[in-house]
Amino acid sequence: MATTTATPTPSAPAPKTNRLGLQVLDYRGGKTTLCAGCGHNAISERIIDSMYEMGVQPERVMKLSGIGCSSKSPAYFMSRSHSFNSVHGRMPAVATGALLANHTMKALAVSGDGDTASIGMGQFVHLLRRNLPIIYIVEDNGVYGLTKGQFSATADIGSKLKTGVVNDLPAIDLCSLAIEMGATFVGRSFSGDKKQLSAMMKAAIAHNGTALLDVISPCVTFNDHEGSTKSYKYMQEHDEPITEVGFVPHFQDIAVDYDPGTSYDVTMHDGSHLQLRKLHEEYNPTDRIGAVKQLMEAHAKGEVLTGVFYVETDKPSFTEMLNLVDEPLGQLTQDRVRPKKEVLDEVMNRLK
Amino acid sequence: MAHQDAGNGSVATQSSGGGANAQNRIVNDFTIQIATVNGSGSQSANLVLLKGIFRMGIPVSGKNLFPSNIAGLPTWYTIRASKDGYLARKKEIDILIAMNAETAKEDILSLPAGGMAIYEETADLKQFRSDVDCYPVPFDKITAAVCPEAKLRKLVKNMIYVGVVAYLVDMDLAAVEAALRQQFAKKVKAADLNWGAVKAGYEYAEQTLARKSGYKLEPMNLTAGKIIIDGNAAAALGAIFAGCTVVPWYPITPSSSLVESFIEYAKKYRIEPDGKATFAIVQAEDELAAIGAVLGAGWAGARAMTASSGPGISLMAEFAGLGYYAELPGVIFDVQRTGPSTGMPTRNQQGDLLSVAFLSHGDTKHPMLIPGSVKECYEMALEAFDLAERLQTPVFVMSDLDLGMNNWMSEPFDYPEKPIDRGKVLGKEELEKLGGFARYKDVDGDGIGYRTLPGTDHPLAAYFTRGSGHNEKAQYTERPDDYIHNMERLAKKFETARSLVPRPEVVQTGKSKVGIIAFGTSDFGVRESRDQLRSEYKLETDYLRLRAFPFSREVHEFVASHERVYVVEQNRDAQMLSLLKLDLAAKEITKLQSVRHFNGLPLDARSVTDEIVTQEGI
C-alpha cells in the first residue's frame, strides 16, 4: 500500500470508510464461537480496527494459525482474506511456505501459548531466527482452553489452576526469547488495553520482518481466578507499561512533537512513525541486551512489563535475503520457470 | 541385444603361452569390485573405470556399497560390464581390487574359483587362494614415483589400479583417458597428474604382470548417444523443468543429493538476467517444517517439493494428512533406505510403500509414483507436479537409494512437450462471472473442487482452509452428512487419480500362465531373471511393472489373465502385495505369491530366479 488515496468527503448518511474506501464491515469475520469475555475476541477487534485504519486491502492479507482457541479466531475477523488454520504448533512452517510462494502478501499469524511455547517451540524459534516478514500474535493465557485448563509453558511459577494444582516450572518469556532469536519487532500487550494494543498492532503492520506481539489474553473459563497470573484482575494490578506507544501512519500528515530526551521516534519500513515515550528510565527500544535485562528484572519483581521492547528496522527480512524476483513465485508463467530445450540438450550432452 | 562374435557368455580358448592351463575367455560380461576405505577418495577412480567402459560402447552399471560413516569404514564399489545390457547387481564378483587391508582377506575369500585379484604386494593374499589369479602391485612405490606431492598420494594411488586393471582386461586407453579428462573437466593439472598415474599403473602391469585371466573388454556400440546420471540428479532436473519454485528440505541420506542437485541446476538455469531467483530454497529445521512449508507454498500457488527418506517421511505424517484433507498440492520425493527406524541409512529398500500410501491418521491415502529408471525419475518428477496441482493433494515419488545415489546409463531425457498444468484455479475474472465459488464442491464430477490463491483481487476469492471438518463452502462443520459427503468426494477424487497416474508397463506374450509384478529398481533384476527362467528352466513369464498407486485397470487385468502372479519387492512384509490385496477381487488375491529381498543390497536376478523356481517346484 504505497499510495495514499484521498479520504472521501463524509456526507451525513455515508458510512465511514478508510483510505481505500472500505468500511470497517469489510474487515469483519464470522461470529465468534469463543467464550463471552474471552480476551481473544478483544484482540480480533483490535486486528479489525488496525487493519481498517491502516487501510490494508483485505485481499492482500494471509491469515495463518495453528491449533487452539486462539488459532480458531482468524475465522472471526477479515473474511475477505485467505486463511489457513493448520496443525498444532506448525503454523510457522506453513507461513514460511506461503510467504515464499507469494512474498508480496501481508502475513498475519495468530497462535496461542500452547501452540507457540510448547508444541510449536521448534518452529517458532526458527521463524524468529529467519526474520520472516509476518505479524505473529500470541494470544497468551497460560492455559490450554480446548482441552479444559491444563497449564501451558508460559504459566508463571507458583500460579494456580482452578483445581488448586500449582505450577512448579518457570514460564518461558516469549519476548526475551524473540529478541534473542532475531525478531525485529518485539512487544507485549494486554487484550484489555485497547489503546496500547491498537498502536502496537498498527506499528506491527508497518513493520518489515518478524513482529512478535505477546498479548496477555485472559481465559475467562479456566484461568481468570484468584491465584492466576494471567487473569484480568492480575493484569490490572501488575501491568507495567515500559513506554507509552504512539503511532502515526505514513498517510497521515500530522506533525507530532516529541522530546528526544524522553521519547524515541522510530521511522517504520512504510514511512509511518512509531513514537515511544519512556516510562522507565533505562528504556531504549534499540538496545537488545538492555531490553532482555529489563524483562528479566520486571519478572523478578512480579511485574508484567508491556510495550514495545525492541525494534530494528534495517535488517533484511527472510524473503529479501533470498533475492527473489519481484512477482510472486507461485504466479510466474511457464516461460520463466521452465528453461528452454537448449538447456536440457546442454545438460544431456555433458552427461554423455 | 547385439552379441559379440565371441559368442554367448563364455568360450573356452587355448592359452597362448607355453603354460598348460586352459582358460575361459570371458568378454564384456563380468563384475569388478573395488574394496576401499571410506574417505580414501576412490570415487573419481571408480567413475573413470565405469565411464571408460561406457565409452567403449559396453553396457555398464556401477554400485556404491558404502557405510554410514565419514571416513574409515570399508566401502565397496562394484562395476558390472554386461554385453547383454543387464544393469542389475550381480551377486558374484569376478575381479577384485583389494585396496583395504582390513577386509582384504575376507574380500579375496569371497571370489569364485578362477576369479582375479589385484592387491598391494605386501599383503600377500595369494596364501589364501591358490585358485584365484593374483596380481600383486607395489601401489605406494608407483604412486610415489608419479606424484611428488605427498599429500596427494592417497588420492592418486586410486588411479594406479585403474591403469593396472585397464591393462589386465585390455581396456581401450583412449576411452579411459577421455573419461578421466571429462571427470576432471577444467582442472587440467589434476587431470594430467591422474592420467600420469593411470599410465604408470598400466605400464607397470604391462612390464611386470603376465595376463593369466580371460576377462576381457572389447569395444561394442551399445552406449552411443546414452548418458550416465544418478536418479537424484535426474529427479532434480525434472523438478527444474517442471517449474518447481519452492524447495524446503532437511538433509537425510539418501535424498540430500536430490535437493543439492536442484540447487546446483537452479543457480545455473533459474536465475533471471537481473540476478534474481525464480526459486526459493529453505533448509528447514526438520522434516515437519519442510513438508509444512511445501504445503503452505502449494496453498499459496507455488510448485513446491521436498525430498526425504524413511525417518523424515515418518515425521511428515501429520502434515500429509492435512495435505490430503485440506487438499493442498505438494511433491515429496521419498528416496527409500533400509528401515525400520534409523535402520541402515546407506542401504537399499522398498520399505515405505505401506506407510506412505496411508501416511497419517484417519482415512487418508496418497498417490505414489514409482520410477523404475533414472529417466523415469526425471519424467515422474515432471508428472508429479502436474498431478499434485490437478488432484490438489500431496503426491509422493517413491525412489530408492539404489536408483537415487548410483550412476545409471540411460537414453537422454526428452524435453517436456505438455505445458505445465496448474489444475483448477479460479482467477478474478472467473469469480466475477460465477459470482463466487464453493471451495470443496464437486462441480465436474471428478471429486476435484476449484480453488483460489491468496492475493486474488476479488472480495469473494477468500476461503478458510482447515484440517478440521468442513463443508463444501469450507465452513467448519460437525454435521454427519457434511462429513460423509466430503469424505466420499475425496474417495471419488482418489478414483480419478487411478486414471491420471502413470500406467504400468506390461510385457505380455499371451502364452504364459505365470506373471511377475515388480516395480522401481527391482525391474533390473527381474528383467534379467526372466531371461534366466526362460533359458535355464524353460519358464516363460509375463511381466507387469507397476509405475504408480492407486493401481490402474491394467493391473487388475494382468492378475486376472494369469494363474500365478509373483510380486517381487525389496522389503520383508510384502508391502506391495498387501496394497494389491486391498484392491483386487477375492478370487484374484489367491493368485498372488511373494518374492521378497530385503538384505539391504540391491536386488540381483539370481535371487529372484531361485525363489520363483523353488515356488514353482521346478
Image (cartoon, helix red, strand yellow):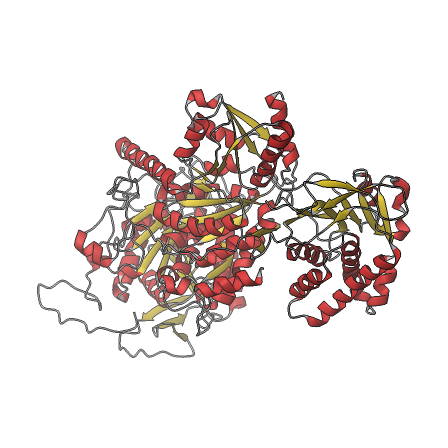
The x, y position of residue B145, in whole percent, is 86, 66
| Horizontal side of residue B439 vs B263, given as left or right | left
Answer yes or no: is residue A291 visible. no
Q: How many marks?
A: 0
Q: Is residue B19 above or below residue B248?
A: above
Q: Is residue A293 above or below residue B318?
A: below
Which of the 4 quarters of the picture holds residue B143? Answer: bottom right
Residue displayed at 89% across by 52% down: B121
| Horizontal side of residue B348 vs B519, given as left or right | right
The x, y position of residue B453, in whole percent, is 31, 55
Residue displayed at 45% across by 36% down: B358
Q: Most extreme residue toward the left, as rendered?
A: A12
Q: Is residue B244 above or below residue B587?
A: below
Answer yes or no: is residue A37 visible. yes
The x, y position of residue B586, in whole percent, is 43, 21
Quadrant (top left, top right, bottom left, bottom right) of the N terminus of chain B? top right
Q: Is residue B486 above or below residue B37?
A: above
Pick whichever, B460 or A348, lies toward us.
A348
